[in-house]
Image (tube, helix red, strand yellow):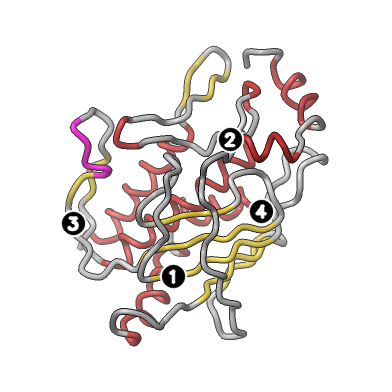
Amino acid sequence: MKGGGLKQFIGDIHRITEADRADAVDGAPYMQPVVPKPKPRDLRWNTGGLDVEFAHTLEGEYDEEWKKGIIAKVFNVFGSTTEGRKLLKDLSSFPIHPQLPALKKINVAFQDNLLQSTDPNADTDGQFHPAWPAEEYALWIKYKKNAPGPGKWPNTPKNCNILYTHRKDESAMAVILYHELLHIWFVNKYWLYFLQKGNTGHLKVENCEYDIVEINNKQYYPFLDRLILFYREIDSKEKP
């Protein structure tokens, strides 16, 4: 690691202030609808003390019965993947330093539409808050009915598209869920890496702006690398 290495990184953690955190997300509109409180029968994972709870937002534009079914399918598909389970286990291992908060809760809400955001980190089909290490997160997933596929993401003319073959709605929404959980993993693992505040894994994906991490003089794209693995696994689950 440059800039003093791991010891320097850990040594700077105690100087994080609320002003730092405000700077890290300056200009990003985080006023989302209140996350519905999960009911006892709602779907949830508990891994190493971390609770991930699905809240059903059924009212809206179309087909409440389809929504009930698709949420359960997303839950089951994601939970059946090796990469999904690995990510949940990694999330339950935080904090990486005793001066950072322990990650205890992630509330996942499914909605017809998400609020528009000017934040270059924000995605059109999923959002999360806050964008720094915290005890609890809110995560929003947009319902995807008749999801297109096969295709490429983010469908940019630049050379960083992920090609995929999956066609099912639950597969498309499981990918969105993984993407947003991956943001939470990234900010808890790499926030302030090289003393950079506000890293979430990527900026504008259509411009291939993924965060780079250097380890032993080698460069990695942790967010993109893990996302590619999940796309591949989801594709393989739809093959006959």
Instruction: Tell me the crowding category of disc 1: few under 14, some 14 to 19, or many 20 or more residues within 10 angstroms, Cα based.
Output: many
Q: Residue at x 24, y 28 (%)?
A: 159
Residues drawn in magenta = 153-157
Task: Give the answer, above or below, for where 212 lies relative to 123.
Answer: above
SS for callout 2: loop
Q: Nearer the viewer, residue 13 or 79?
A: 13
Magenta stretch: residue 98 in it? no
State the residue position of label 4.
Answer: 92
* Disc 1 to disc 3, C-alpha distance: 21 Å
| Residue 198 numbered tag | 2
Q: CA distance from mark 2 to mark 4?
A: 21 Å
| Percent coordinates x, y for residue 171 in the rendering | 32, 62
Q: Which mark is residue 132?
A: none
Residue under numbered circle 1: 110
Which residue in the protein does label 3 denote? 149
Mark 2 nearby-residue class (10 Å; few <14, some 14–19, many ≥20): many
Nearest to the eye among marks 1 and 3: give it.
1
Q: Residue at x 47, y 62 (%)?
A: 140
Badge 3 amino acid:
Gly
Q: Which quarter of the figure has residue 209?
A: top left
* C-alpha distance separating marks 4 and 3: 32 Å
Comparing labels 1 and 4, the label whose residue is closer to the camera: 1
Q: Are marks 4 and 3 in contact (CB under 8 Å)?
A: no
Q: Secondary structure at mark 3?
A: loop
Along the line of sight, which residue is nearer the eye, 167 or 111? 111
Mark with earlier residue (1, 3): 1
